[in-house]
Every structure is written in C-alpha cells, then in structure tokens.
Image (tube, rainbow, N blue to C red):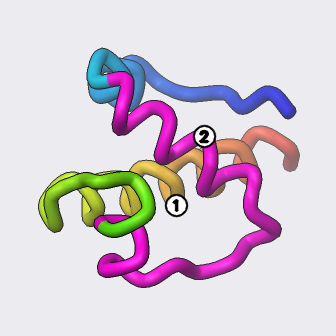
Amino acid sequence: MAYTINGEIEGYFKDKNIEFAVASLLRGQNTKFSEDAIVQVFNLSKKDAKLCMKLTEDIRTLNKIEEV
C-alpha cells in the first residue's frame, strides 16, 4: 500500500529504524499499539516510539484528507 507523505515526515525517515517502525505500524489494521510495545518490538527509545506513533497518525490523517 502506498502512502503520500510530506517533506517534514520524509526527513524523519533518514533514520531507517523509524522508517521501518512506521511502515510496520501503517500495515497494522488501525491497531493502536502502546508506546512500551513499540519500544520493545522495534528496540527504540521512548522518544522515538512517541515519534513513530505521531508520524503514523499524521500519515493516516494526511492520506484521509487526500482521499476526499
């Protein structure tokens, strides 16, 4: 599935761990993962886990807007 992202989001994807985590979260069926689960599964810091959750939500929102 392809997603449209903006330049700000693309800048965060220079970190391949964040890119992989966000891509994995986007593939989930709108499942809400806890911050602690993201930290453990993707071996990220709490700060990066929060960022991944925010980026995932931003991408979903951005793509919902473009569908309208």
Of the numbered discs 1 and 2, the one sitting upstream in the chain is 2
Residue drawn at x 57%, y 46% as measured from the top left: 59
Quarter of the rendering occupied by the N terminus: top right
Which of the 4 image quadrants contains residue 15? top left
Residue drawn at x 72%, y 31% as measured from the top left: 3
Query: Disc 1, disc 2: CB below 8 Å?
Result: no
Q: Is residue 64 left or right of residue 5?
A: right
Q: Is residue 39 above or below residue 48?
A: below
Q: Is residue 38 left or right of residue 47?
A: right
Label 2 residue SS: helix
Residue corresponding to mark 1 = 57
Residue 52: horizontal and vertical position, in percent? 37, 53
What is the C-alpha distance between the residues marked 1 and 2? 12 Å
Residue drawn at x 59%, y 81% as measured from the top left: 32
Q: Is residue 24 magenta?
A: yes
Residue corresponding to mark 2 = 23
Q: Is residue 31 magenta?
A: yes
Residue 31: horizontal and vertical position, in percent? 69, 77
